[in-house]
């Protein structure tokens, strides 16, 4: 029987265009997945055409349904009110299943000429990641996976604020013999980022003394001006802290391409960026009023700023220092390739995925530095908390005033809300992100450690200790990643240990178990000398098999839709649905039972392989570790 091409929607749209007399692009835009399983695919074209043709949508749909030139894989077309409903042939489902089961790159969209730069998580380099930082990092990492799967080239960038006040405070604390880091209750007390975090709590209390505040400010000024050896010592401390933080990242499967340090931004691209802002007329120097002497951008004429009491935004203060917004605008110009890339880069570390993470390294102390082709992106995504919505809005507004409307539209703020553990909220300065003697901390390390312990309790006793350790790590990571990624980023999260680890609910381990079950069935098939093969022409698909095949058919549309909106949570929902559909199939459709014929066994093994590919593709995007057995 004839089978559809890989772009079956193009075939369907072409036929719909010929039958309706509507432009081919309009016909394709009208095609969609049905909201209920009443058909396989549908079109709402009659809605837009009825008014123009002075007839009812239902009448127009009924007329088109009688057309005779539909693709060979369309078994039936019927009008359901204003909709055209399409039902596909068994040959179509066989082709869909064969493609998913047999093609190595199945589920990936064709390459696009789009480079996406994703900045995350930009944590202050003087403390461990807490669970809020973890949500940022997981969103950024999974978005990069999503966009890469959807054909974009992705660059994962981390912004390191090595000139921030908090870093200066930690540098000051490192020079104090009396500095305390009493982290004895933490299993991570010897990890540098944790030790620095505990010292930061001690330093924050010393800042109540005026002389300490003065010393810290003086130290910060030396760091900003590049005085030696202060600047080099501060940079070294920051790099060591970042490496410790990245140990946390690696434990969750999170990696980066390049880290850009604020000190290098200030000393390298900021001057050019500032000149470009001034030359464009987007900012002016105030000569009077409260902003006298400041370089200010006036935003009253920009969408969303009209009527605001203080719509003006300072980029350069009267003392000549730059605000965060001023530096961020220059950094954004560089990301889009609108400034010369005068950065030099050097290797920072080789990550567990065998990829090198590079750091900007324009410091004189760096000898192995060289240019590299970072940035120059067509779209920029900043993963930053919801509380930073206004500054992100300002950056886009300044870009528009400079004449870069296209870049402003391509500058996306992936906003996210807070994460709360059952114990409550936390504060970095007070150290409440650290666990007490009898409680779990709010650090990402301690959360994963606790989840590992809980996961071990669910593992069958016949596994070796080494296997238990490996499986518990994978299950804990899956539980945390899925719990953090399934909600819309704009929703607040309260983490629930038990629900996140459930093997029977809406969880990462549930998806892992479905994947492992499919893997085991295929393994048993190979042991019996059976391989997946397409169903014969007389094979009759049951309801569960068609439901599974429909998901395979919908995947490219779901993938592109999620990527175009920069939303990860639809993929989490889709993958969960795929795991559920596979489990329904498994419980209703015997695969290797004695009463099943050899040809049907091979056909159903192909369905298992296709389901495994679909679930696996979603797991890849969500970063859920795959287990062949559980």
Image: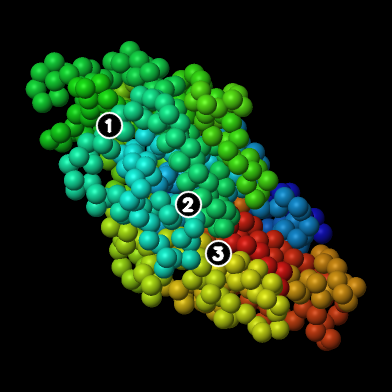
Residue at the spot x=44%, y=35% of the render?
233
Colour scheme in the image?
rainbow
Residue 523: give its label: none
Q: Residue at x 47, y 52 (%)?
A: 192
Relative to 72, say whether 397 is above or below.
above
User: Which element is circle 3 on?
Assistant: helix
184 w.r.t. 339: above or below: below
Asked if one can make out residue 381 in the rendered structure from this viewpoint, the answer is no
Instruction: Report how far apart the C-alphas of labels 1 and 3 lie in the structure.
Output: 43 Å
Quick check: can you spot residue 629?
A: yes
* Residue 195 percent across, percent down from the top left: 43, 54
| Residue located beneath label 1 in the image | 218
- The image shows residue 357 at horizontal and vertical percentages of 59, 40
Q: Earlier in the sequence, mark 1 or mark 3?
A: 1
Image height check: is 33 above or below 501? above
- Mark linked to residue 477: 3
Task: Identify the mark nearer the N-term, 2 or 1.
Answer: 2
Q: Which one is nearer the viewer's eye here, 563 or 323?
A: 323
Marker disc for residue 192:
2
Q: Residues within 10 Å of mark 1 (few under 14, many from 20)?
A: few
Rendered residue at 55%/71% (across/down): 452
Residue sitting nearer the eye, 628 or 7 = 628
Label located before the other in sequence (3 or 2): 2
Q: Quadrant of residue 168?
A: top left
- Foreground disc of the pair 3, 2: 2
In the rendered structure, the answer to whether residue 105 lies left or right of residue 557 reads right
Q: How far across and how far down the image is residue 470, in percent?
A: 65, 68
SS class, disc 2: helix
């Amino acid at each position: 029987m004839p089978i559809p091409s890989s772009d079956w929607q193009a075939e369907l749209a072409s036929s719909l265009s010929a039958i309706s007399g509507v432009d081919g692009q309009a016909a394709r835009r009208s095609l969609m997945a049905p909201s209920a399983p009443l058909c396989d695919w549908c079109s709402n074209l009659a809605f837009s055409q009825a008014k123009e043709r002075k007839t009812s949508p239902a009448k127009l749909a009924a007329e088109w349904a009688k057309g005779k030139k539909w693709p060979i894989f369309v078994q039936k077309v019927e009008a359901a009110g204003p909709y055209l409903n399409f039902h596909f042939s068994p040959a179509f489902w066989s082709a869909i299943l064969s493609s998913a089961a047999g093609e190595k790159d199945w589920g990936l969209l064709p390459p696009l000429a789009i480079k996406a730069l994703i900045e995350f998580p930009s944590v202050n380099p003087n403390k461990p990641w807490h669970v809020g930082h973890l949500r940022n990092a997981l969103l950024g990492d999974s978005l990069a996976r999503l966009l890469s799967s959807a054909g974009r080239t992705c660059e994962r960038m981390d912004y390191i604020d090595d000139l921030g006040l908090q870093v200066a405070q930690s540098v000051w604390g490192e020079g104090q013999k009396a500095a305390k880091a009493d982290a004895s209750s933490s299993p991570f007390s010897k990890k540098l980022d944790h030790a620095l975090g505990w010292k930061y709590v001690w330093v924050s209390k010393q800042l109540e003394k005026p002389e300490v505040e003065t010393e810290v400010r003086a130290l910060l000024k030396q760091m900003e001006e590049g005085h030696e050896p202060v600047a080099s010592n501060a940079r070294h401390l920051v790099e060591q802290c970042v490496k410790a933080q990245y140990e946390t990242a690696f434990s969750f499967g999170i990696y980066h391409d390049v880290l850009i340090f604020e000190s290098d931004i200030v000393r390298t691209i900021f001057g050019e960026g500032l000149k470009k802002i001034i030359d464009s007329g987007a900012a002016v120097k105030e000569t009077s009023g409260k902003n006298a002497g400041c370089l200010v951008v006036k935003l009253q004429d920009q969408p969303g700023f009209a009527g605001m009491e203080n719509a003006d935004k300072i980029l350069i203060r009267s003392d000549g220092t730059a605000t965060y917004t001023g530096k961020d605008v220059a950094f954004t110009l560089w990301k889009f390739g609108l400034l010369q890339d005068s950065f030099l880069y050097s290797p920072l570390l080789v990550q567990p995925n065998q990829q090198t993470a590079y750091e900007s390294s324009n410091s004189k102390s760096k000898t192995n530095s060289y240019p590299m082709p970072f940035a120059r992106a067509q779209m920029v995504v900043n993963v930053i908390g919801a509380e930073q919505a206004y500054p992100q809005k300002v950056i886009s507004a300044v870009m528009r005033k400079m004449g870069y409307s296209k870049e402003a539209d391509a500058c996306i703020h992936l906003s996210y809300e807070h994460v709360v553990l059952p114990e409550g909220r936390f504060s970095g300065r007070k150290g409440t992100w650290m666990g007490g003697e009898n409680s779990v901390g709010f650090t990402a390390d301690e959360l994963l450690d606790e989840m590992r312990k809980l996961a071990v309790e669910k593992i069958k006793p016949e596994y070796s200790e080494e296997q238990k350790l490996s499986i518990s790590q994978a299950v804990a990571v899956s539980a945390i990643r899925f719990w953090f990624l399934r909600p819309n980023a704009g929703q607040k999260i309260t983490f629930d240990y038990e629900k996140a680890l459930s093997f029977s609910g809406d969880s990462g381990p549930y998806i892992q178990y479905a994947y492992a079950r499919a893997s085991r069935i295929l393994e048993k098939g190979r042991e019996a000398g059976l391989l997946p093969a397409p169903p014969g022409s007389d094979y009759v698909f049951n309801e569960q098999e068609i439901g599974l095949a429909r998901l395979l058919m919908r995947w490219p549309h779901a993938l592109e839709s999620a990527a175009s909106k920069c939303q990860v949570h639809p993929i989490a929902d889709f993958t969960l649905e795929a795991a559920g559909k596979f489990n329904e199939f498994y419980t209703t459709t015997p695969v290797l039972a004695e009463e099943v014929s050899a040809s049907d066994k091979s056909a159903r093994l192909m369905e298992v392989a296709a389901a495994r590919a679909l679930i696996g593709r979603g797991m890849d995007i969500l970063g859920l570790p795959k287990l062949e057995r559980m």
